[in-house]
Image: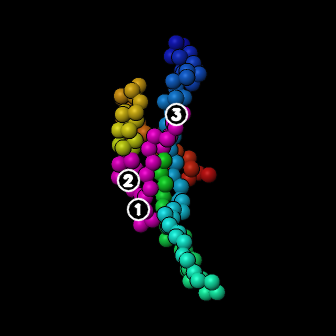
Amino acid sequence: MNTCQSLLLHPHCKEFLEDLVTGDDSWILYDNATEHAVWIPRGDEPPAVPKPDHHSHRFLLCCWWDARGMLYWELLSQDTTVTASTYTHQLKKLAQTTRENQPRSKNVHPSMAMTALMSQKRRRKRW
């Protein structure tokens, strides 16, 4: 009975929501092109500028955040295959930055985050 009561009260704790880490990934267009001014004599035609090819600048943005803000983000190029080792690497970096930035989270382990991530991916596939 005591265990049930403590579990019912657990979500109402402020620390529970502050420690909750969420992650997502999304394809984005990222173009770091710089434009520059060109002086053209009066009466001359401006030089032709080709249209940018936005499809070649697609990246996968993987980001992780909590109630306080962004914890870790990474841009993966279009030719990168997302595998379990990619997620494992990201979760290790996430655990490292979380340990460095949040003194209360010394016992963050990547396997805990991996379990949460896989359940999130399974739920997303069902929809």
Question: Sequence order check: which comes first, mark 3 or mark 2?
Answer: 3
Magenta stretch?
64-90
Kindly give the residue lying farthest to the top in the view shown. 2
Q: Which residue is mark 1?
A: 81
Residues at badges 2 and 1 in contact (C-beta under 8 Å)? yes
Question: Sequence order check: which comes first, mark 3 or mark 1?
Answer: 3
The residues bearing labels 3 and 1 have C-alpha atoms spaced at a distance of 30 Å
The residues bearing labels 2 and 1 have C-alpha atoms spaced at a distance of 8 Å
| Left or right: where 83 falls relative to 23 | left
The residues bearing labels 3 and 2 have C-alpha atoms spaced at a distance of 25 Å
- Give the quadrant of residue 53: bottom right
Does residue 108 lie above or below 53 as drawn? above
Residue displayed at 45% across by 65% down: 78
Q: Which residue is mark 3?
A: 68
Disc 1 residue crowd, few under 14, some 14–19, many 20+, Cα 10 Å = few
Task: Check disc 2 and give the amino acid type.
Answer: Thr
Q: Which residue is mark 2?
A: 86
Q: Quadrant of the N terminus?
A: top right
Disc 3 residue crowd, few under 14, some 14–19, many 20+, Cα 10 Å = few
